[in-house]
Image (cartoon, rainbow, N blue to C red):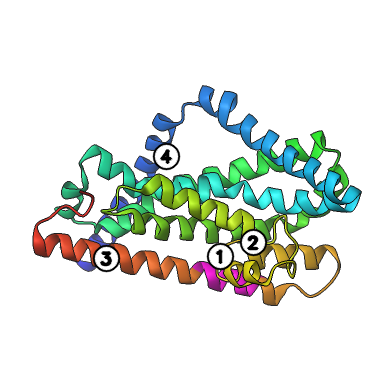
Amino acid sequence: MTSPEYAAERWWRAGRIVRFGFLQYRADNPPRIVLAAIWPRLIFQTVFWVLLGFVAAGDEGARFAYVGAVATVLTLGGLAGMSDVPVDDKYAGTYSRLLAGLTPPTLVFFGRGVAQLAMSVVEMLVAFVAAGLLSGQWRTMLELVPLLPMYLVIALTMSAMGLATASFCVGKRAEVAIYNAAMYLVILCSGAFIPRGTLPVLDVIGSVLPATHGLLAVRSALADEPWLAELSLEAAVGAGWLVLAFYLFTAQTARSRRTGSDSFS
């Protein structure tokens, strides 16, 4: 097979993997479930955080909480949802079939995860608009519209951590505990609701977690302060989690092929 033909085949396979990810997402999350359960939950959750911020610190607290709550919406699809991508093979018993395929399992997981990333962004936008209107934060919502690309960087970083989190689940049979712990760490330590500097230990943990630097960039931009350095740090954190995920999945694949064991058992 010539090089152009080989490249075309690889792109075709990549497209099929991504397409399968969307089909799998639709099968696991039918539109009626999304509309009746997932989206309302995220909207009311965001409104709850805003009301809690108002109770704690008035109008400024509500504004602070709204900016952070929009980012935490990404923990459901971007972190927990992305973690489910490899775990699905564990439950379906299909991991051994991936080992025999032409495309490395690591790239299969990344490709199938595109659907989770895309849908996490959709969920964020739904909560952004609906909760902004319901909680009276429409002025803040309008101010944030030009800054939505920053939230997209956070979405990418969150998804990268989701993949890395899934790699820790392999062989542990503790995926729910692991990715839920990761979600709550992000909510607690990212500065979404607890201002940076309140508890130094949270700041230290949050410095290597998604959303922390991205939210600092968003808040700096809202205050007309420099934000590029923080956004760059957010991208660097995401790259670090992505490299960790790639390394761990690749190592697990090599071990499985060497020992003949199923890493998901």
Of mark 4 and mark 3, the one earlier in the sequence is: 4
Nearer the observer: mark 4 or 3; the answer is 3
The picture quadrant where one finds residue 39 is top right
Tell me the distance, in whole angstroms, between the alpha carbons under discs 4 and 1.
27 Å
User: Percent position (x, y) of residue 252?
Assistant: 24, 62
Indicate the position of residue 124 as horizontal and vertical percent values. Answer: 64, 45
Q: Mark 3, residues whose alpha carbon is within 10 Å: few (<14), some, or many (≥20)?
A: some
Location of mark 2 (residue): 190
Q: Marks 4 and 3, how far apart in space? A: 24 Å
Which residue is found at the position 26% from the left and 53% from the top?
171
- The mark closer to the camera, 4 or 1, is 1
Whole-angstrom CA distance, mark 2 to mark 4, is 29 Å
Residue with the mark numbered 4: 22
Q: Secondary structure at mark 3?
A: helix
Q: Percent x, y for residue 112?
A: 37, 48
Q: Position of residue 117 (x, y in %)?
A: 50, 49
Q: Quadrant of the N terminus?
A: bottom left
Mark 2 and mark 1 in contact (Cβ < 8 Å)?
yes
Q: Quadrant of residue 237?
A: bottom right
- Is label 2 in contact with label 4 (beta carbons under 8 Å)? no
In this view, the residue farthest toward the right is: 59
Residue placed at 45% from the left, 51% from the top? 179
Nearer the viewer's eye, disc 2 or disc 4?
2
Q: Which residue is mark 3?
A: 250
Q: What type is the residue that disc 1 sits on? A: Leu
Q: Which residues are magenta?
A: 231-238
Residue plotted at (87% across, 51% down): 57
